[in-house]
Image (spheres, rainbow, N blue to C red):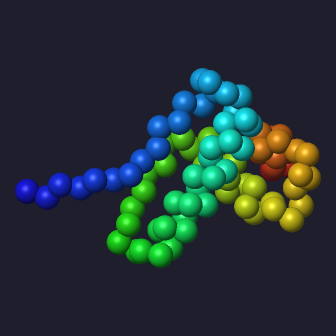
Amino acid sequence: MNVLITPHTHLDVGWLETFDSYYYLNVSKIIPGVLDNLAKDSSKRFSWAEISYFQVSLVLVSLKSTRSPYESPMGTLVRVIESL
């Protein structure tokens, strides 16, 4: 029998904090740490459940040079979606 243990997330979007607040206080620190660890060891895996936070992270990384530091993560996502 093989037992696989996979680290994963469980972040309740909008439960205790606003989307933006939770992103800045938690998610913005979790994702870089996870990506750094995955880059160091290709045998590691990680499951990210909250696609809304992951999507915002990808958008912010791709727009890092064009995003205003005063614009919220959700505001950036809305601006990108509206431009499509």
User: Which residue occupies the foreground of this view, 75 or 24?
Assistant: 24
User: Which residue occupies the foreground of this view, 37 or 48?
Assistant: 37
Residue 30, percent across and down? Answer: 57, 52
Res. 3 image quadrant: bottom left
On the picture, is 31 further left or further right than 58? left
On the picture, is 77 further left or further right than 68? left
In this rendering, the count of numbered labels is 0
Res. 53 image quadrant: top right
Residue at 38%, 66% in the rendered image = 44
- In the rendered view of the protein, which quadrant contains the N terminus? bottom left
User: Which residue occupies the foreground of this view, 47 or 80?
Assistant: 47
Residue at 61%, 61% in the rendered image = 32
On the picture, is 16 further left or further right than 40? right
- Residue 62 vs 79, above or below: the answer is below
Residue 59, percent across and down? Answer: 73, 55
Residue at 77%, 39% in the rendered image = 74
Furthest-left residue in this view: 1
- Residue 16 vs 50, above or below: the answer is above
On the picture, is 54 further left or further right than 69? left
Residue 81, percent across and down? Answer: 78, 45
